[in-house]
Image (cartoon, grey):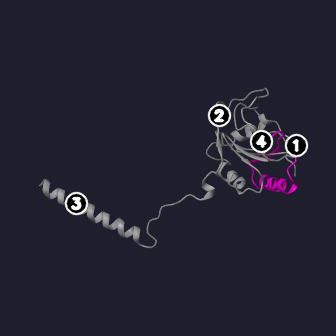
């Protein structure tokens, strides 16, 4: 009896293998999905461990410029485009809510500012502001992640926004409006 069971099992395995082989070789058969660029973070993204997400009533000294997370004020910064610098502690709270904070050097050319303004205008989870002392002309930040760019024309900026807005690193997906600050039109 054990011999008959062994032969039957072998027959089933051979038949199943033939079926899978035929299905995979036929047009329209099973395919392996490959991620699109919107499903992947762009090249060059740095990762940082964020130790705390506590609310504090004081100014905070951050390890990164601009910060990518950590202790922050209880009120978040309303998302949108700001022509003037904003408090890091409020922006970090927005990052906690799933926002992407695009910071830029104050002397960035107007054409690049217009691109950043458009990104912030078209997406309710993009916060944009100048940041004096920035290590590169444009920096995109999300909770625990950062991408330094030489220009707002770099396609990775849009890819960063698509991947990280309300994305996998946000500890608390919540509104990015109804708090402090009035974005510029």
Please give the residue where the numbered disc 1 appears in the rendered image. 84
| Closer-to-camera residue (131/54) | 131
Q: Residues within 10 Å of mark 1 (few under 14, many from 20)?
A: few
| Closer-to-camera residue (181/168) | 168
Give left or right: position of 22 versus 179: left
Q: Quadrant of residue 106?
A: top right
Please give the residue where the numbered disc 3 appears in the rendered image. 10
Q: CA distance from mark 4 to mark 1?
A: 18 Å
- Residue drawn at (31%, 67%) of the image: 18
Is label 2 in a helix, a strand or a loop? loop
The boundaries of the magenta stretch are 107-135
Mark nearest the camera among 4 and 1 is 4
Q: Residues within 10 Å of mark 4 (few under 14, many from 20)?
A: some
Q: Earlier in the sequence, mark 2 or mark 3?
A: 3
Q: Earlier in the sequence, mark 3 or mark 1?
A: 3
Are the residues flagged by discs 1 and 2 in contact, CB closer than 8 Å? no
Magenta segment: does it hold 128? yes
Q: Position of residue 174 (x, y in %)?
A: 69, 42
Mark nearest the camera among 2 and 4 is 4
Q: Position of residue 165 (x, y in %)?
A: 68, 49
Q: Which mark, residue 135? A: 4
Give left or right: position of 11 versus 35: left
Give left or right: position of 14 versus 175: left
- Residue drawn at (18%, 56%) of the image: 6
Q: Position of residue 91 (x, y in %)?
A: 77, 39
Magenta segment: does it hold 7? no
- Residue drawn at (71%, 44%) of the image: 141
- Residue drawn at (65%, 46%) of the image: 45
Q: Residues within 10 Å of mark 3 (few under 14, many from 20)?
A: few
């Amino acid at each position: 009896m054990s011999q008959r069971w062994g032969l039957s099992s072998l027959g089933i395995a051979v038949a199943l293998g033939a079926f899978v082989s035929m299905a995979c070789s036929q047009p329209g058969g099973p395919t392996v999905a490959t991620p699109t660029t919107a499903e992947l973070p762009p090249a060059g993204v740095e990762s940082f461990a964020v130790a705390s997400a506590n609310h504090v009533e004081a100014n905070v000294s951050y390890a990164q410029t601009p910060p990518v997370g950590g202790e922050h004020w209880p009120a978040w910064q309303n998302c949108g485009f700001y022509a003037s610098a904003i408090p890091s502690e409020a922006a970090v709270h927005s990052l906690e809510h799933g926002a992407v904070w695009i910071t830029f050097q104050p002397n960035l050319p107007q054409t690049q500012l217009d691109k950043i303004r458009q990104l912030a205008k078209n997406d309710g989870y993009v916060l944009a502001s100048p940041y004096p002392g920035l290590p590169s002309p444009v920096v995109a930040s999300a909770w625990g992640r950062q991408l330094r760019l030489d220009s707002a024309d770099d396609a990775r900026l849009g890819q960063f926004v698509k991947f990280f807005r309300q994305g996998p690193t946000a500890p608390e997906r919540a509104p990015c409006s109804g708090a402090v600050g009035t974005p510029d039109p």
